[in-house]
Image (spheres, helix red, strand yellow):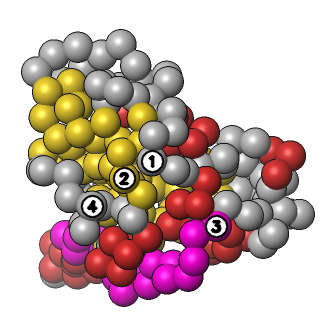
Amino acid sequence: MRKILQILLWLPLAACLATPARAAEGMRPYQGPLKCSASGMDDMWLDQRLGCLTPGSRFIVNAGGAEGETQDMAYVVNEAIYDNDFYLINNRKVRYFQSFLCVRNHPRGVRPLFLSGDLANALELSNQDRKPAGVGPTSVNISGGDRAGGVATACDPARHPLIVDYRSGKVESVNPLALQALHVYELPYN
């Protein structure tokens, strides 16, 4: 009898552990005109900042110098927005933008941390002075959360809102229309 009670007590926990984490599906990406403003918290999301970029502008800075075999890579980029007291805004959820960034001629030795820093700088998310009231640091990372953070694939302006060429270090393509097909999801912060 005691064994049966122990098993019954562990069943709910086992069921929780066996259930895979689920992303909040169905987030709709920004569909408006290009902008680079910071008048409200919503202006800080990656998909609303493509207006900060122009083809030919410098992008690769910190991630430069990598070597190795090259291929095109599309990345899931995630963003966490904090308030001035370093508490996560957005109900403690991190937002993920699948295939937001594609890097052409991506060498094997690129460090994702440096690449995500270059993205944050290019989208002007690092500048504390240009943020709206109540918004503090913004964290931008290359990571898929519950799925792969990057995949080797041909960079396609119809599918990838931002394409960067690693060899030249510059923005190759900015396409807000690609946002329409972008998969955006949220996961709780761990």
Q: Are the two marked residues, 4 and 2, in contact with CB atoms closer than 8 angstroms?
A: yes
Depicted 73 relative to depicted 50: above or below: above
Task: Give the mark, 1 or 4, whose residue is nearer the N terminus.
Answer: 1
Q: Secondary structure at mark 2?
A: strand
- Alpha carbon of mark 4 to alpha carbon of mark 2: how far? 7 Å
Magenta residues? 18-35
Q: Are the two marked residues, 1 and 2, in contact with CB atoms closer than 8 angstroms?
A: yes
Asked whether residue 23 is in view, the answer is no
Asked whether residue 29 is in view, the answer is yes
Task: Give the mark, 3 or 1, whose residue is nearer the N terminus.
Answer: 3
Helix, strand or loop: magenta stretch = loop
Q: Which mark is residue 173?
A: 2
Q: Amino acid at mark 1?
A: Pro
Q: Which residue is mark 3?
A: 35
Q: Secondary structure at mark 3?
A: loop
Q: Secondary structure at mark 1?
A: loop
Task: Give the mark, 4 or 2, whose residue is nearer the N terminus.
Answer: 4
**Residue 39 highlighted magenta (yes or no):** no
x and y, in percent, of residue 117 in the image: 53, 35
| Quarter residue 92 falls in | bottom right
x and y, in percent, of residue 127 in the image: 75, 42
Q: Which residue is mark 1?
A: 55
Q: Amino acid at mark 2?
A: Ser
Return the residue nearer the eye: 53 or 147. Answer: 53
Q: Which mark is residue 157?
A: 4
- Alpha carbon of mark 2 to alpha carbon of mark 3: how far? 16 Å
Q: Write the residue at 17% across / 41% down.
A: 72
- Alpha carbon of mark 1 to alpha carbon of mark 2: how far? 5 Å
